[in-house]
Image: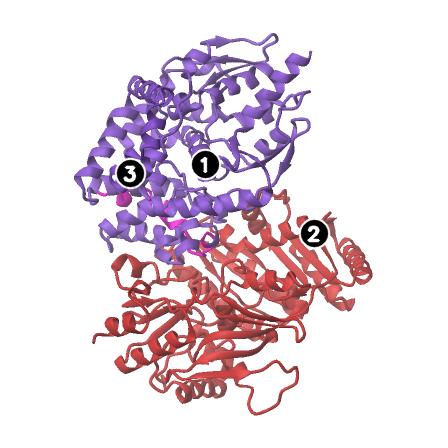
Chain colours: A purple, B red
Amino acid sequence: MNLLRDMDYSVLQQCMHCGMCLPTCPTYVETKREKNSPRGRIALMRSIADGTSAVSEAFADEMYYCLGCLACQTACPAGVHYAELFETARAEVERANVLPGVERGFWRWLALDVIFMRPWMLRAIGIVLRLYQQSGLEALLRRVRFFGLLPKKFESLEKQTPRMSAAVSDELIDVLETPAEPRYRVGMLTGCVQDIAFSDVNRATVDVLLANGCEVVTPRSQNCCGSLHAHNGAVENARELALRQMSAFDLDSLDAIITNAGGCGSHLKSYSHLLPDHPMAKKWDAKVKDIHEWLAAIGLRAPMASCGVDRVTYHESCHLCHGQKVTRQPRELLKAIPGLEVVELPESNWCCGSAGIYNITQPEQSQKLLERKAGHIRTTGCKHVATSNPGCHLQIQRGMNEEVQVTQPVLLLAAAYQRESRQT
Amino acid sequence: MTLIEQLIAATDASRVLTQHEDLVVYGFDGTAALKEMPAVVVLPRNTQEVAACVKIARAASVPVVTRGSGTGLSGGSVPLPGCVVLTLVKMDKIIELDEANLTLRAQCGVITKEIDDAAGRVGLFYPPDPGSMKISTIGGNVAENSGGLRGLKYGVTRDYVMGMEVVLPTGEIVWLGNKCVKDVAGYSMKDLFIGSEGTLGIITEVLLKLVPKPKARRTMLALYDTMEAAAETISAIIAAKIIPCTLEFLDRMTVKCVEDFARIGLPVDVEAVVLMETDGHPAAVEEEASQMMDLARKHGAREVKMAQSEAEGATLASARRSAFSALARMKPTTILEDVTVPRSELTHMVKFINDCAARRGLMIGTFGHMGDGNLHPTFLTDERNHEEMHRVEEALEEIVDETLRLGGTVTGEHGVGLAKKRFLRKQMGDGSYELMRSVKMALDPDALLNPGKIFDLKSAS
């Protein structure tokens, strides 16, 4: 068995190696080596499918050096479905078990098989982390440089621990929230990391939906959408999570399922690829909408008050712009806020290096991309940068500390609606 | 020391690639269905390293194939089995921009678009714009004598090369040409290397001519219900003594694929779209633009539109540049041709190509540079379908014969490489074919550099 050999060969053949992807690939631009480019990676996959190359450790390393940012998919005139190739290749790497290391195996098991399969456990971890951060223990340990005693890898990881929200989404959002004059009825996805570290973004998303005439249904204790698993070669777990996700909603009673995290949305819209025989998957995919996309589709009601921020620049989450092709709507949303100047960010759709768990698995390359991003943000002179994915949010905040404040379009929009309601 | 050890000693270990996974990905360029495995890939940083690698390969009698970004469309940079590949993308510095003499000197690995961008920052312009200009290297452009969308008015790469540094098959480094507009001292050796496809020497540095950036530019789109009407418009524009910088056409299939990709609102129910662009002095541009629009309407355009801004014009041109790759959306394999005929034969040739495809039951998309007679009929097929591939071969043969009968050439801008090799003698005739071969033998008697490209080395007769 070999997943690359078993897949539809025409997907591999779709790449005619013209090279249009090269200048948009962050890893190729860094190294200028073909192996680190989309067409190089596809050539390797095809070579495995042809039986002229083996699923080797070098191949595996390359598949994990790829960010999976999908910039190549935007650049590709031939319409190569890189996301599918990339997920299949990583799944084959895991199936063939060519990457060594007991330690890697342990962390993968802990994250992909244990924690991110169990929403209660993730929330429990969130609560413990929150207490640890609130109690001042974290600050104390950092002050006495306790983490300097740990191996370097853990020391740098410790710095990346996200700040936990004061409450999880279920505490902030009711199962059913209804505006005065409902026009639509939508389901709300609260996510996993989003739920414990950005529950305020979830609350803000519900607020802007209500302000735009949407009744919001938010099932309790939601699961991870499975994108983490699909992108890291754990397809079976991804399938299981997709099934759980779909069963949490009464699809026919809803006009849309709203997601507010770029990385999740891209995956949530492709359940039919994961579960081709599932009777609901196609309909599910069609109903999943990114919040910015949905608001633009139903006609965003511009707020009548400002949001408290006067200048902002916008960094695009890769899987929102390349994965979902949602580029115009978040900018329009920001521009609809009175008194808010939106400054275009150079290379706004270039990966910031967060890329799921890439900042953990490839810290060096991730850091280079973060610095590139920070440099561009500095040129805008903005003190606020908006983005719409928890990974990007954490990464940029970590890279720029006090220099800028990272926010999200829905946070700014919700703040504007809130000010508006105070004025009236 | 082994060949690999010597190459590492001449460069460094991180830039000498020998692992299987590193070699597979250098096995091809932008050409369909051509693949070979090199023995080693080296990424030199400067001319001295290139020269050292050539000497090492020469001593070991291992052929050398040079490549830039590997976007070639005739197989010119596809390796030979077991060869040394020199990839020059790391030689990517612009060395000098001389505003007094309107020249730019750059290492061979600079991306073509970066050259034009650098010129543009000081009000200058580098006109050659091959479809791959965002990716391809200037060294590759010179070695292939690349064309582009602006060939009609501005000519091709050759017209902008004033000088170059070349590493010869002996490993010797020579400089050819200078900054003088006039120079008749001796043979124009640089011209020998332009378009030589890596068979005579390795171009490591280029001195390019720049021109003042046109002050104004207008981009227009004319839509047609018949291909003939589109071709007639082109003839009428040329006959009216207008030389626009761009006259591109796309047929129905190509427009559909480009629109599928770029989503810029191209109409998909037309038989042909002609993209027209004029640049120069603002007054002249306005006049030419309105003349061209009138001519298009007079010759049966269903609709003629003008881009409202420079950005909109650039979007249209950029969409056109994606045509070849976009056609790949339809079928697994795209076989791209590059036949060129005298402009007066254009209408006939386009019709011939369509009839030929229809007669053989083949799917084809045609686009190209109508203003200069350079067509890109593209067969959409599947390399695994041997029966259909055979019909493609037959159709190609027929198209080439007709092209040559009309006084045309098998390749207008992609080069001969491997893909057009078998047609070359037919086009050139025995005399000039053998003359070309004797030049190769004089410069590279040991057949070190890219042997077997353009023509076979051993005489068949």
At horizontal 22% and vertical 31% (from top left) the residue drawn is A109
What is the C-alpha distance between the residues marked 2 and 1?
30 Å
Chain on which label 1 sits: A
**Badge 1 local density, few (<14 within 10 Å), some, or many (20+)?**
many
B333 vs A159, nearest the viewer: A159
The residue at which mark 2 appears reads as B310
Percent coordinates x, y for residue A183 in the rendering = 59, 13
The residue at which mark 3 appears reads as A148
Provide the residue span drawn in magenta.
Answer: A2-22
Q: Amino acid at mark 1?
A: His
Relative side of A53 to B15, left or right: left
Percent coordinates x, y for residue A351 in the rendering = 45, 43
Q: Amino acid at mark 3?
A: Gly
What is the C-alpha distance between the residues marked 2 and 3?
55 Å
The residue at which mark 1 appears reads as A319
Q: Quadrant of the N terminus of chain B?
A: bottom left
